[in-house]
Image: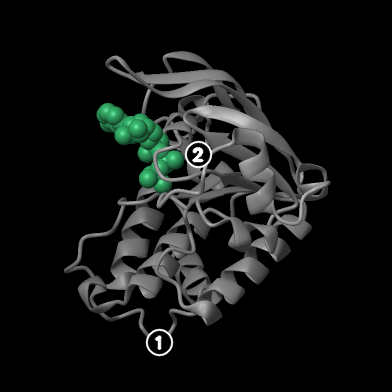
């Protein structure tokens, strides 16, 4: 369970996130949606202990990330820009993370197969396509068999088959009783993946609830967003 409560994050005078509250529950895929610059990454960075909150809390199973006893076994995360060393082989990148977290080496092979990188395991990361890089990032997130997955824009760089694959994967992951929180600026993508949605715009939550609740009375999630904010769909979407 993830609980964000009255969270604010300022960078100097700039408010990136203001008074954001929502929960992501076990057994559900929760989509965290908003245009570029809405405050999604800032929220996730605080949740994962990479930045301090200016106010409010972001808790994982009732604790701050940095207080978790086994962080990698509790939360698996894929963040934008947190890539591996390009010269490293895929398998070595994962082995290094596994070793420093006391995860058995056999799990490295398992996650490589799970994300479809079994054949490419010994290739250097710099030779990977964008989509393969995303799969490697997901493999790293899965190493500790976490009960919670937090993914920032996981479909970026994936081809249509890759998008279908990750959608199915995340749905199955949540169906097994785990918590999945994923951010995206792609509304249509999210309507095929998420059970619950949290829509953020200009640092504030504009609506949250089940997909059905949020889209009720609208033809699509895009229309719901537009009706709620009055914002034209800018290039950020
Ligand atoms: N380190 C930082 N210093 C100053 N401003 C920042 C910093 N990080 C983010 N911001 C600003 O905070 C706001 C929210 O950014 P954030 O990256 O959280 O949005 P986002 O919804 O994740 O968008 P994107 O999908 O483009 O990453 C933006 O206006 C951004 O410019």
Disc number placed over residue 1 in the picture, else none: none
Residue at x 75% of width, y 52% of height: 195
Q: Please tell me in which quadrant of the rendered image residue 84 appears.
A: bottom left
Using residue 84 as the reference point, say whether residue 156 is left or right of it.
right
- 233 is higher (above) or lower (below) than 55: below
Is the residue marked by circle 2 packed among few (<14), some (14-19), or many (20+) residues within 10 Å? Answer: some
Kindly identify which numbered label has been placed on residue 119: 1
Quadrant occupied by the N terminus: top right
**Ligand 1 shows up in which quadrant of the image?**
top left
Instruction: Tell me: residue 109, above or below residue 11.
Output: below
Q: Residues within 10 Å of mark 1 (few under 14, many from 20)?
A: few
Q: Residue 125 vs residue 155: left or right?
A: left
Say which of 66 and 208 sits in front: 208
Task: Indicate whether 146 appears above or below 40.
Answer: below
Where does the image place residue 99, in percent across and percent down from the top left? 37, 55
Task: Measuring from the top left, give residue 119's x and y in whole percent.
Answer: 40, 87
Q: Which residue carries the number 2 mark?
A: 71
The answer to whether residue 211 is seen in the rendering is yes
Q: Secondary structure at mark 2?
A: helix
- Compute the Cα span from label 1 to label 2: 29 Å
> Which sits in the foreground, 84 or 103?
84
Colour mapping used in the image: one colour
Q: Which numbered disc flags the more N-terminal residue, 1 or 2?
A: 2
Residue 120: where, in percent of width, then height? 36, 83
Q: Residue furthest bottom?
A: 119
Residue 50 visible within the image: no
Q: Residue at x 29, y 14 (%)?
A: 13
In front of the other: 99 or 164: 164
Which residue is painted at 36% across and 54% down in the image? Answer: 97
The single residue placed furthest to the left in the displayed view is: 87
């Amino acid at each position: 369970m993830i609980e964000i409560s009255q969270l604010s994050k300022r960078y100097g005078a700039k408010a990136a996130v203001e008074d954001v509250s929502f929960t992501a529950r076990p057994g559900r895929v929760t989509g965290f949606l908003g245009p570029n610059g809405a405050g999604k990454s800032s929220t996730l960075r605080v949740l994962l202990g990479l930045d301090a909150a200016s106010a409010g809390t972001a808790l994982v199973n009732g604790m701050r990330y940095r207080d978790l006893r086994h962080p990698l076994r509790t939360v698996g995360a894929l963040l934008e820009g947190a890539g591996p060393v390009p010269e490293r082989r895929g398998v070595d990148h994962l082995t290094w993370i596994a070793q420093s977290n006391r995860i058995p080496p056999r799990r490295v092979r398992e996650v490589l197969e799970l994300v479809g990188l079994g054949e490419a395991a010994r290739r250097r990361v710099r030779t990977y396509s964008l989509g393969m890089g995303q799969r490697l990032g997901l493999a790293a997130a899965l190493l500790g068999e976490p009960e919670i997955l937090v993914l920032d824009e996981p479909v970026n760089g994936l081809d249509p088959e890759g998008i279908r694959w990750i959608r199915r994967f995340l749905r199955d992951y949540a169906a097994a009783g785990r918590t999945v929180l994923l951010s995206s600026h792609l509304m249509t993508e999210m309507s095929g993946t998420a059970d619950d949605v949290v829509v953020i715009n200009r640092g504030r939550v504009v609506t949250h609830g089940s997909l059905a609740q949020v889209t009720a009375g609208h033809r699509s999630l895009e229309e719901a967003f537009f009706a709620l904010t009055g914002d034209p769909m800018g290039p950020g979407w």
